[in-house]
Amino acid sequence: MPNPTVVGFSGNFTRPSKTRGFVDQVVRDIARQHGLSASTYDIEDLGPSLGSAKWARDLDGQARAIFDSVVNADVLVVGSPTYKGSYTGLFKHFFDLFDPASLRGKPVVLLATGGNDRHALIVEHQLRPLFGFFEALTLPTGIYATDKDFSDGVLRAEPILKRVEQVVGEVGLVLANRSAAGVVAG
Ligand SMILES: Cc1cc2nc3c(=O)[nH]c(=O)nc-3n(C[C@H](O)[C@H](O)[C@H](O)COP(=O)(O)O)c2cc1C
């Protein structure tokens, strides 16, 4: 049986990106602590077919492979930079291509970054309802980090790192329950 996977998807489309680094850091922590295979993608990885795609079938091979790895992930970590008080438009456009039932019950970790604390509720007011639409299992601890929490593009603020630890633990509880129920390999 293939190893369970944790897949990160970040809504940034410029690099270097604090958001992509943050998503990847959480993905790697989850992978290390719970023995999952890990990969992280962003809008840039999807390439040019995303912008003109009206349906998932319009994505080219590279974008479709990322789309499929998100759909098939055992754990998903999503994050976006805050743009005008919400996730980026292309982040939403990517998830608009998903079948409404495709993420049902999937454990999803919610992350966001912003320039300051003013839009910290993007996680609860924008990301959580989007994944609520998909009937995904969003983990209770959502995390928002601002520019001051990073140094050299790496998340270093202690209170945020503690929240990362907290959500990694929550993922462990979900995986343990699923493993006991025979839903995913543990
Ligand atoms: C077009 C644009 C709009 C932005 N809007 C907001 C905003 O509404 N609120 C906020 O806190 N930061 C805003 N920011 C700042 C970014 O969210 C912040 O710098 C983010 O961490 C950048 O992430 P990245 O390094 O992954 O690109 C905006 C930045 C850009 C470029």
Image (spheres, rainbow, N blue to C red):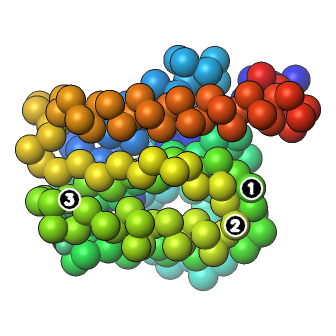
Residue 88 visible in the shown view: no
Q: Nearer the viewer, residue 178 or 99?
A: 178
Q: Which residue is mark 3?
A: 114
Q: Earlier in the sequence, mark 3 or mark 2?
A: 3
Q: Residues within 10 Å of mark 2 (few under 14, many from 20)?
A: some
Mark 3 residue CB less than 8 A from any atom of ligand 1: yes
Residue 2 lies, with reference to residue 121, above or below; the image says above
Q: In the rendered structure, which amino acid carries the disc numbered 1? A: Gly
Q: Circles 3 and 2: CB distance less than 8 Å?
A: no
Residue 54 lies, with reference to residue 18, above or below; the image says below
Q: Nearer the viewer, residue 113 or 177?
A: 177
- Measuring from the top left, give residue 7's x and y in whole percent: 57, 40
Q: Which residue is mark 1?
A: 105
Q: Earlier in the sequence, mark 3 or mark 1?
A: 1
At x 67%, y 69%, the residue is 134
Work out how far the residue at label 3 is from the one at label 2, CA to CA, in angstroms: 26 Å
Q: Which residue is mark 2?
A: 135
Lateral position of residue 38 relative to residue 81, left or right: right
Lateral position of residue 44 relative to residue 173, left or right: left
Q: Dot 3: what SS? A: strand
Q: Nearer the viewer, residue 130 or 47?
A: 130
Residue 63 visible in the shown view: yes
Q: Circles 1 and 2: CB distance less than 8 Å?
A: yes
Work out how far the residue at label 3 is from the one at label 1, CA to CA, in angstroms: 28 Å
Q: In the rendered structure, which amino acid carries the disc numbered 3? A: Gly
- Measuring from the top left, give residue 163's x and y in whole percent: 36, 37
Q: Earlier in the sequence, mark 1 or mark 2?
A: 1
Q: Residues within 10 Å of mark 3 (few under 14, many from 20)?
A: many
Give the quadrant of residue 172. Answer: top right
